[in-house]
């Protein structure tokens, strides 16, 4: 075994749905204003007693079931999140406890919106190096906990949810080499800070950076996998804003690919957005087993990470 693969995926969203009309009753906004600027129609919001590790555990349990595995088959749990309330136990340990996974290594990664693709690369490295045999890789965020619901520029964007993947050793490399990095001097453009912590961003700066600087980086991720963008069957970008996703996907040149647009019904779920959208594409049959799909995360810290994976 000299590679790794995604054996299965799963996702979870809270039952409560918040529509644009609901938000119009809370702040000075409208359905037309929100759709025209970010493309979002609805988002799911967790209840106050539904913590982020519970969202993560639901998604992970679905991925385990889809892979036909038991909790004891997992020896590494990685959770990408930026909305954990407590410092310890970390979210990964709490997920492992909820699922009954015995003695796994447990780690949280906070790379905000690019968290899942960073975590997936970390699991790929660990499995290929022999440090783990099977890993649960989860992106989960409860953005409603860090949102100022009186700020119409940010509260219309966010949603809660989780997505997960089971990564295991394989004879072929079905998770391509990661291309990752950041622009630290622009890290202030997307932030969750303060007491209590609140999400804020400089929308125009993020838009310009994402649509001008990221396309060549995403194309290089394809090159590392030995593919042209036109070879891709799917493109799953961080679901930040439809006005970012559509021009970015076009500039990448993935002319034959299905482009995930889950942001329209889920909002920006930060680290959950890529695995959530990817799991839905797989579930819907929009991409098939073995198809090459680009996963590309970007956002907080102005970090980015992308890799081409083969669908489970």
Image (cartoon, rainbow, N blue to C red):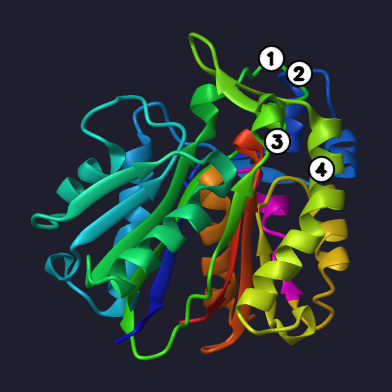
The residue closer to the viewer here, 217 or 8, is 217
Is residue 263 covered in magenta?
A: yes
Q: CA distance from mark 2 to mark 1?
A: 6 Å
The reply, left or right, for residue 85 in relation to residue 132 is: right
Q: Are marks 1 and 3 in contact (CB under 8 Å)?
A: no
Dot 2 falls on a residue whose secondary structure is loop
Residue at numbered disc 2: 27
Is residue 282 covered in magenta?
A: no
Q: Residue furthest top?
A: 195
Q: Position of residue 297 (x, y in %)?
A: 62, 53
Q: CA distance from mark 4 to mark 1?
A: 27 Å
Dot 1 falls on a residue whose secondary structure is loop
Dot 3 falls on a residue whose secondary structure is loop
Quarter where residue 253 is shown: bottom right
Earlier along the polypeptide chain: callout 1 or callout 3?
1
Where are the magenta residues, as a range? 258-269
Earlier along the polypeptide chain: callout 4 or callout 3?
3
Identify the residue at image location x=51%, y=16%: 197
């Amino acid at each position: 075994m000299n590679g790794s693969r995604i054996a299965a995926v799963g996702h979870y969203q809270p039952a409560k749905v918040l529509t644009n009309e609901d938000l119009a009753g809370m702040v000075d906004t409208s359905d037309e204003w929100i759709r025209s600027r970010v493309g979002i129609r609805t988002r799911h919001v967790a209840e106050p007693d539904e913590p982020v590790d519970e969202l993560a555990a639901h998604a992970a349990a679905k991925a385990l079931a889809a892979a036909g595995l038991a909790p004891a088959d997992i020896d590494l749990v990685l959770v990408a999140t930026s909305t954990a309330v407590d410092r310890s136990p970390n979210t990964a340990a709490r997920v492992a406890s909820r699922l009954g996974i015995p003695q796994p290594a447990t780690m949280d990664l906070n790379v905000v919106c690019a968290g899942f693709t960073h975590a997936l690369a970390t699991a790929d490295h660990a499995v290929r190096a022999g440090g783990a045999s099977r890993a649960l890789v989860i992106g989960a965020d409860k953005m409603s906990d860090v949102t100022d619901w009186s700020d119409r520029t940010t509260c219309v964007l966010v949603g809660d949810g989780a997505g997960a993947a089971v990564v295991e050793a394989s004879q072929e490399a079905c998770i391509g080499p990661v291309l990752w990095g950041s622009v630290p001097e622009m890290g202030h453009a997307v932030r969750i800070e303060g007491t209590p912590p609140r999400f804020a961003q400089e929308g125009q700066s993020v838009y310009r950076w994402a649509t001008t600087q990221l396309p060549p980086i995403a194309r290089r991720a394809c090159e590392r996998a030995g593919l042209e963008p036109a070879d891709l069957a799917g493109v799953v970008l961080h679901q930040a804003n439809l006005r970012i996703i559509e021009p970015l996907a076009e500039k990448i040149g993935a002319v034959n690919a299905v482009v995930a647009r889950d942001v329209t019904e889920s909002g920006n779920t930060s680290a959950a957005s890529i695995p959530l959208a990817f799991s839905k594409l797989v579930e819907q049959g929009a991409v098939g087993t073995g198809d090459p799909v680009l996963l590309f995360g970007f956002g907080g810290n102005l970090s980015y990470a992308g890799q081409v994976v083969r669908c489970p």
